Image (cartoon, rainbow, N blue to C red):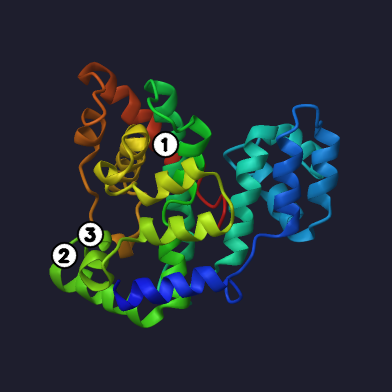
Amino acid sequence: MTDFAADLKTLIDKGKDLPALPDTILELRTALDDEMTGDMKIAEIISRDPVITGKLLRVANSVAYSRGVEVTSVLNAVQRVGLREVRVICVVLAVVDALPGSEGSLDLKQFWDHSAAVGRVAQLLCRKLQLQGAAGADDVYVGGLLHDVGILLMSQFFPDQFQEILTVRSETGVPLWQAEKKVIGMCHGQVGSMLTARWSLPEGINICIAGHHVPEDAPPEYEHACRILRASEALCTSLGAGVDAEGEADDDAFNALSSLDMPDDQIESVLGEIEEVGVSVRGLFA
């Protein structure tokens, strides 16, 4: 085990220095698992956390969800966004607060715009393609939204190693995840999955995060989901919704879709939809 891996395991196992997701999120997940829970109960739970309340209202009034009329109540925000989306959005909003990142090492607005775009593109591709294996479409969506959370963890808790990784990426021109392999022996997907497992997120999400750059290393029943995430990130990066620190996309846009066995005659129309997704989610979480 490398020094970094040992230090990371210690950080994860002890947990005392790690930010925790608020109790509101845990209560919300439990409530949403009950199909009998209605909008009013969910709004009541969210209202107990003023930070998440304010952020959810902003999301509900963003370009991605706006219908021209301003939403001013949590109940109306829940109804506009939808219960399934609320589960996802509130987790991500909590993570935004929990891991602010190190000032100067990342453009956080760019980072979260990229994360939102990858999640939405993954959601779109799950609809276009027949998702195979053990992962559900929600696992892939959340995995896309949180796929780079390991970068935030490293920038905040391991700033020296993270700066060395950035230096290697800059000097060699390799993508960030490959520079990470050289410096610390693992990529940010693996790092992030350890954190999300510590937060008790579902296994499918953790595996998708771990394998989003190396789907061939994922368990066979999750490989297709990880391939969709890899393609989603490559698409967003190659179409201008990437993160500067990560470097070039793993593949160009056309090849990313071809790698998922999408017919050539569908690719152009899907590329047009993906560009619209990137625009609609700007500023969603930043």
Q: CA distance from mark 1 to mark 3?
A: 21 Å
Quarter occupied by the N terminus: bottom left
Q: CA distance from mark 1 to mark 2?
A: 26 Å
Task: Please name the amino acid that badge 1 sits on.
Answer: Val
Number of other residues with Cα within 10 Å of mark 2, as a class: few under 14, some 14 to 19, many 20 or more: few
Q: In the rendered view, does 99 fall on the left or right side of 57?
A: left
Kindly indicate the quadrant of the structure image that contains residue 79.
top right
Task: Please name the amino acid that badge 3 sits on.
Answer: Pro
Task: Please name the amino acid that badge 2 sits on.
Answer: Gly
Q: Earlier in the sequence, mark 1 or mark 2?
A: 1
Q: CA distance from mark 3 to mark 2?
A: 7 Å
Residue 121 is marked as 1
At 23% across and 18% down in the image, what residue appears? 263
Label 3 element class: loop
At 49% across and 31% down in the image, what residue appears? 136
The location of residue 252, given as percent across then percent down, is: 20, 41
The location of residue 102, given as percent across then percent down, is: 47, 76
